[in-house]
Amino acid sequence: MFKKQNLSPPANSLRQGPDENGHFGLYGGRYVAETLMPLILSVEQAWKQAKHDPAFWEEFHKLAADYIGRPSPLYFAQATTKHLGGAKIYFKRDELNHTGAHKINHCLGQILVARRMGKTRIIAETGAGQHGVATATVCALFDMPCTVFMGAEDVERQKPNVFRMKLLGAEVVPVTSGSATLKDAMNEALRHWVTHVHDTYYLIGTVAGPHPYPEMVRDFQSVIGTELRDQMQQKEGRLPDTLVACIGGGSNAMGLFHPFLDDPSVQMCGVEAGGHGVTTDKHAASLTGGTPGVLHGMKSYFLQNKDGQITEAHSISAGLDYPGIGPEHAFLHDTGRIQYVSVTDDEALAAFQMMAKLEGIIPALEPAHAFAHVMKLAPTLPPDHLLVMNLCGRGDKDIFTVADKLGMKI
Amino acid sequence: MSQRIIQRFESLTSRGQKALVTFVMAGDPDLSASTEILSALPSSGADIIEIGMPFTDPMADGPAIQSAGLRALAHGTGLTEVLSLVQQFRRHNQDTPIILMGYFNPILAYNPQKFVQDAASAGADGLIIVDLPPEESNEIAPHARAAGLDMIRLITPTTDSARLPHILTGASGFLYYVSIAGVTGSKSADVNAVADHIARIKTQTRLPVVAGFGIKTPADVSAFSRIADGVVVGSAIVQYIEQHQKETNLAQRVSAHVSALKSAMSA
C-alpha cells in the first residue's frame, strides 16, 4: 500500500534538481564556512548512499507507517466545499501525524541518516516548535541527546511546545542574538555545529540550508504528494487540479508539490505569510517581497535591505516567521511553474476560526494561511475542480496566540 | 596578486619576523573613531590589517564580533562606508596590506564585480569571504583576480588531505589557518596540534600561512608566532574596543594594546 517515491525523474523534468553542486538553477549551493564544508560533504555522501539503499527506505516506511501513522488520510471537506460554493475541496491530513505536523517526516528520515553516519548527538533549530518537538521525539525514540535552538521570542510565544521538548528529554536553548526568532536560532545552530563537528548531526527543519538539505528534506516530505497521487486516483480516478500549501521555509509545500511538478495539468500555489501586508515592513513573504541573496548556506530569496542586510520577518505564525525560503521554491518561482501568493495575519486568523467551525478541525496558524487562500480561490472554480490543501499541522500550540489576538483570556 | 602582501612578508622574513594581523570592525564604535583606530594601527605594530564588513547574520562569529557588527550597522556602516575608510587609510599609508573580511550577501547586493573593482581602487589588497567556499566562489574570484585582489582562503582543522589541494588551487596572498573548529573568539587552540597542521600545509604550498581564531593574549601571540608566518588577533581587540568605546583617547588605547601584542611576538 505504500509506494516508494520515484527518485529518478526523466531528462527535462522539473524534478531533476539539484545539480551535483546542489544548485537549482541560480539558487541553492553550499555557502558555508570552510570548517563545515567537509561535514556537509559527508552528509551528502551518507544521503546519497541511503537514497539508493532499499533497506534504508524499508526502515523509513516501516516507521512512517507504525510510528508516524502514515499514510495520512485524504479527507473530502464537504462542509467547506458547500460553504465556499465552488471547487471540490480536499484536505491532506498531515496534522494527524504523530506530533501533530508534517515535520516528523523529515525528522525520521534525517535521524536515520545521522545514525548511518555514526553521529551520536542531534541539534536542531525551531520556530513554532513543531520541528523541535518532532526532532526531540525521534531523538527520544533512538535514544540520542538532543539540543534545540529556539529564538527567545518564540520560546515565549510557544510555551506548550517548549514544555513538550523538555518532556521528551531535549535541551532547549533560548537564542537572544539578533531578532531572537527562527533565523537567529539557525545562526546559533550553525555556530554550535562548527564547534561540535565530530559527533553532531544538524537536523535542519525545512527545505533550506546548504546542499544536500533542501534535496534531502524534500525527498522525505515527498511522501505527502506521493500518497496524495494514489489516494486521489482511488477517490476520483484522476489527478488533482490545484494544490495549495503554506510556505515559511517551504517543507510541507515542497513535499506536496514535488511529485506533481511534471504534470502540467496540476496547478500549484504556495501561500506566504503576508503579516500586516506585503507593502508594509512587517511580513514574511520572501518571494513576494524579497530579493535574491545568500544566507544560511544557500542562495535564495530573502527579506533584506538594499545593502544586503537581512531584515526581520513578521508573521502571526511562528512557523512562517522566517526571512528566507528554500532554494527550490526560488527556482520554481522564477520558472513560473508554481504561483506564490500571500495572505495577511488577519486573513489567517479568520480562516483559523472558520475551519474550526466548519470542519471541527483546529488547524495550526501555518495551514490557516493556506486555508485563507482556499477561501478566496475555491468560489472562483467549478464544482468538478479538485482542490487539495495540505493541512500540515494542528492548532493546539496556537490557541494562546489566537486567544490573545481575539482579546480572550484562557 | 597584491604586491603589498608579497612585499610585507618578504620584508618581515628578511628581518626574521612574523606578521601581526589585526582585525577591527569597520564603523565600530562609529566611523570617525574607526578611522582613527585604523590609522594608528601600523605604527603600533600591525603588519597586516583585516577590516570587518558588518553583516546582520555573521554565522561564523562569536559574541564579540557579532556585537561589533551590530554597533557598526547601527551607525549605518555599509560597504560604501567600508571602502571610504580604506581610501582614507591609504592617504597616509601605502605599505600595510588591507584585507576585507565579511560575508557574501552584502557583496552580492553591491554587485560582486563592481565591489572588487571599487575595493581595489580604494586600496584593499585581499578578501576573505567567510561563507564562500571555493565551490561557490566563481561569482567573484575571477573578478577579484582581474582587479588584483587576493582571495584569501581558509584552511581548518577539518580540512583533510583530499580537500587541501582543492583549496590551494586558486589561493593567493597568504593562507589563513583557522586554529580551532569553532567560531571567532573561542577558547585557545592547542599550539602543538596547530603546528602539525601548518607543517602539513607547508609541504604543499609556498604561500605564507597565518593562524587565527582563539588567539587573544600576548602569550598566545608568542606561542603561535613560533609555528606560523603570522598570527591574527581579532575578537580580543574588538572586545577591547567595546570596553573602552566611551573613552576619548580610544585610538591611543587600542594602539597600546596592539603594541603589547607585537612585543610578545618579537620576544
Image (cartoon, rainbow, N blue to C red):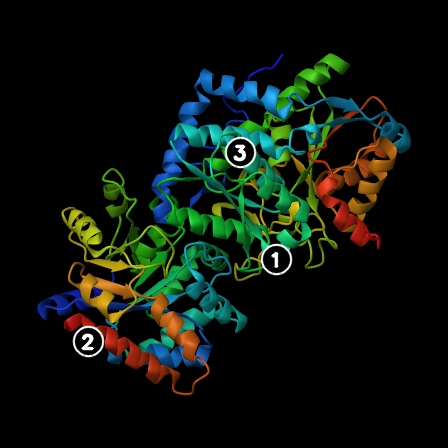
Q: Is residue A26 above or below residue B13?
A: above
B187 left or right of B72? left
Pinpoint residue A387: horizontal percent, then vertical percent. 77, 27
Quadrant of the frame with the C terminus of chain B: bottom left
Q: Is residue B127 visible?
A: yes
* Residue position marked by numbered label 1 in the rendering: A312
Residue found 22% across the figure and 68% down from its top: B219
User: In front of the other: label 2 or label 1?
Assistant: 2
Disc 1 residue type (three-letter): Glu
Protein chain holding label 3 = A
Residue found 65% across the figure and 44% down from its top: A161
* Contact? badges 2 and 1 (CB < 8 Å): no
Protein chain holding label 2 = B
Q: Is residue A46 above or below residue B195?
A: above
Q: Is residue A2 above or below residue A393?
A: above
* Residue position marked by numbered label 2 in the rendering: B263
| Mark 2 to mark 1 CA distance (whole Å) | 44 Å
A107 left or right of A350? left
Secondary structure under tag 2 reads helix
Q: Nearer the viewer, residue B81 or A182?
A: A182
Number of residues whose C-alpha sits closer than 10 Å to that of mark 3, classed few (under 14), some (14–19) or many (20 or more): some
* Residue position marked by numbered label 3 in the rendering: A140
Q: Nearer the viewer, residue A301 or A133?
A: A133
Residue found 45% across the figure and 77% down from its top: B31
| Mark 1 to mark 3 CA distance (whole Å) | 33 Å
Disc 3 residue type (three-letter): Ala
Q: Is residue A338 above or below residue B93?
A: above
Splitting the image into 4 quarters, where does residue A371 fall?
A: top right
Q: Nearer the viewer, residue B166 or A347?
A: A347
Q: Can marks 3 and 2 be said to lie on one chain?
A: no
